[in-house]
Image (spheres, grey):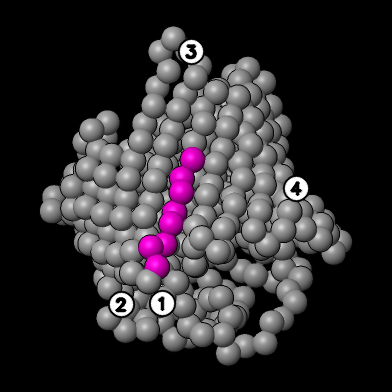
Amino acid sequence: MGNSSSTPAAPPPSSSTVAPPPPPANPSQPSSLTPPPSADVPPELKIPNVFKEEVSNNPGTFEELHRKCKELFPQTFEGGRFLVSKGLSSHFQVSHTLTMSQLSPQDSGYKFGATYIGTKQYSPSEAYPVLMGDIDPSLNLNAHIIHAFSKKVRTKLQSSVQEGKFMGQGSVDYLGDDFSTTLTLGNIDLLNKTGVIVGHYLQRVTSSVALGAELVYQRGPRVPGGEITVLSLASKITGENWQFTANVCPSAVAAHCCYYHKVNEQLHIGAELESSLMTRESVGKGCYQLEIPGGNAMFRGSIDTNWTVEAVLEKKLMPLPFTLQLSGTANFANIQKSQYRFGIGLVLG
């Protein structure tokens, strides 16, 4: 939810739309270039588990390095939001979203979305192909296609049309027995010789330790000197109920660390630290996720060193097919002019 900038380069992409791959300006975290196969996939579209659980020695992809911790942070919003989703079959679903926000008028309005999950299944939690997309009345479009040609080869395509401007990127993941590698191309323009190329490699060294690297090459008129290459190193240490991940960019003197801990089945906690000596900035965050099975509710909360407090409560209104969402954000950096933002949402389906 929070990003720190370390070197001057092209502006980072927006998190709400499909944008060019992250430039080397943000080397303190792995490039989140495309959503994971299960991202934003409605639970009702998941194919039933017909496979026996298999223990995999693959360390996962580089972009999933900090995912366990990141998933605990609340996704806050402001204003009102109403979502209606309807499953037309066990593989296809459509949705209608109405958002009203005073602080972000550009995000307000109506969106139509659709999700399709294929029947090609390699594991209990993954089925392919996955097609996701949404469009608004202004014809702004976001689309994602994820497909696995085999258990080890997975491709992802992402495209966006925003205000008449097209942006696209594609990546290929190869999942080996004890390593993973990814190659991503973003907004490649051969005529103007611009674009971003990102390579990832993650190797399991022991049963609990994985090491890897990220190499980013960017070329364009906004890049100092016309082109830039940045190398980042990463590590992942996994325990029985905890995980520590970190990646460091030597050239930018920046680091990004995350810690995740599963206290019990209901409570999960996490901590994140982003620091850059070049910009002389450091931001620390703490978060937790609490599930209340008896109350059909889930609560996520976080606080950071900028005195920002965020929280989201999701409550299923059983036996009705409704989910109530309450969101709140407060910033106490200036105690005399504290800022507050609240949101309420209702999900049907």
Q: Amino acid at mark 1?
A: Leu
Disc number for residue 45: 1
Query: Can you say whether 167 is above or below 276 in the image?
Result: below
- Residue lying at the far bottom in this picture: please name it: 50
> For this rendering, which residue is in front, 136 or 332?
332
Instruction: Nearest to the eye among marks 4 and 1: give it.
Output: 1
Q: Residues within 10 Å of mark 1 (few under 14, many from 20)?
A: some
Say if residue 301 shows up in the picture. yes
Crowd band around label 3 with a 10 angstrom C-alpha radius: few (<14), some (14–19), many (20+) = few
**Residue with the mark numbered 4:** 244
**Picture residue at 61% right of the left edge, 45% below the top:** 288
Dot 3 or dot 2: first in sequence order is 2
Residue, x 63% and y 17% (percent of image)?
A: 280
- Relative placement, left or right, of 223 versus 175 is left
Marked residue nearer the N-terminal end (4 or 1): 1
Q: Nearer the viewer, residue 104 or 257?
A: 104
Amino acid on which disc 3 is placed: Ile
